[in-house]
Image (spheres, grey):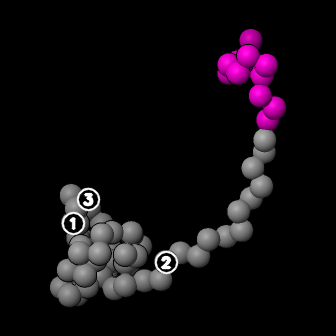
Amino acid sequence: MQITCTRNVMASGQALEAGQSYDVSDSDGALLIRMGKAVESEAPTKSKAKAKRTTKAKDDGACRLPE
């Protein structure tokens, strides 16, 4: 669940800062929302994926570091 904290809180052993968005478990998110310490926010939209650069594998399959 994606939430935005309205106050500094602890959830799942992590400190969450007010004004920041976090992805937390559904149970932690629901609890913080009921307590008035967070509001549900929309999941971040994914931007277009950039094309990954592919490299040609070596003949022996081993990774080699530049000398």
Q: SS of the residue at dot 3? A: strand
User: Is 64 included in the stretch rendered in magenta?
Assistant: yes
User: Of all residues shown, which one is farthest toward the right?
Assistant: 56
Mark 3 Cα-neighbour bin, 10 Å: few <14, some 14–19, many ≥20: few
Residue that mark 2 sits on = 43
Q: Position of residue 2 (x, y in %)?
A: 40, 76
Residue 22 placement: quadrant = bottom left
Q: Position of residue 42 (x, y in %)?
A: 47, 83
Q: On screen, 1 above or below 59?
A: below
Q: SS of the residue at dot 1? A: strand
Say what amino acid the circle numbered 2 marks: Ala
Whether residue 19 is visible = no
Residue 3 placement: quadrant = bottom left
Identify the residue shown where x is 78% and y is 41%. Answer: 54
Say what amino acid the circle numbered 1 marks: Met
Mark 2 Cα-neighbour bin, 10 Å: few <14, some 14–19, many ≥20: few
Q: Which residues are magenta?
A: 55-67
User: Of all residues shown, which one is farthest toward the front?
Assistant: 60
Q: SS of the residue at dot 2? A: loop
Circle nearer the viewer, 2 or 3: 2
Q: On screen, 19 above or below 12?
A: below
Mark 2 to mark 3 CA distance (whole Å): 20 Å
**Mark sitting on residue 19:** none
Q: Are marks 2 and 3 in contact (CB under 8 Å)?
A: no
On screen, residue 13 versus residue 44, left or right, reads left
Residue that mark 1 sits on = 10
Q: Position of residue 55 (x, y in %)?
A: 79, 35
Residue that mark 3 sits on = 14
Identify the residue shown where x is 73% and y is 16%. Answer: 60
Q: Position of residue 53 (x, y in %)?
A: 78, 45
Does label 2 or label 1 sit earlier along the sequence?
1
Residue 4 placement: quadrant = bottom left
